[in-house]
Amino acid sequence: QVQLVEYGGGLVQPGGSLRLSCAASGSISTINAVGWYRQTPGRQRELVATITGSHSTNYADFVKGRFTISSDNAKNMVYLQMNSLEPDDTAVYYCYATTVVNNIYWGQGTQVSVSS
């Protein structure tokens, strides 16, 4: 089992920045990738960014150049630095982790609201 807890959501003005954090615990050694999804009401959850154990990253086109995913393996933390935020970035952001046995785990989600 893997447990994930997100931190750092909130309200920010357009053009502003936020950093989301995700703390992982449990069967850390089984994790092969972590990342972030987001979801708005009435829409499917969409992938934002992923980082693997070797620090290879992948981003959705709509966040390239604005968001940066990183991880600190020593602290079992994953971060999402979000810059140049837009109202369309408003969503609940979920941390996720996949494991070597193809399980997927989710955090509880954190609300990000971009509004003036």
Image (cartoon, helix red, strand yellow):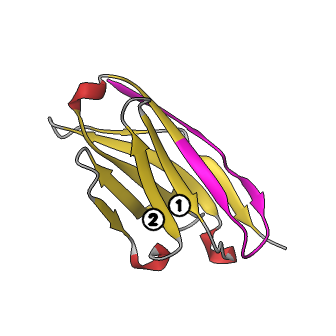
Q: Nearer the viewer, residue 36 or 55?
A: 55
Residue 38 x/y as whole percent: 51, 59
Q: Please determine whether, in this image, residue 100 is positioned above or below residue 27.
A: below
Lateral position of residue 33 relative to residue 81, left or right? left
Specify the segment rendered in magenta: 1-21
Q: In the drawing, what numbered circle is on residue 44? A: 2
| Towards the viewer: 103 or 95 | 95
Where 111 falls versus 106 (above or below)?
below
* Quadrant in the picture for residue 47: bottom left
Residue 18 location, quadrant: bottom right
In this image, 61 relative to 42: left or right? left
* Dot 1 alpha-carbon crowd within 10 angstroms: few under 14, some 14 to 19, many 20 or more: some
The mark found on residue 39 in the picture is 1
Kindly identify the residue that appears in the image at 41 percent across and 31 percent down: 76
Asked whether 17 falls inside the magenta stretch, the response is yes
Which amino acid type is shown beneath numbered disc 2?
A: Gln
Say which residue appears at 68% left-offset and 64% top-offset: 17
Residue reaching furthest to the left = 101
Three-letter code, disc 1 = Gln
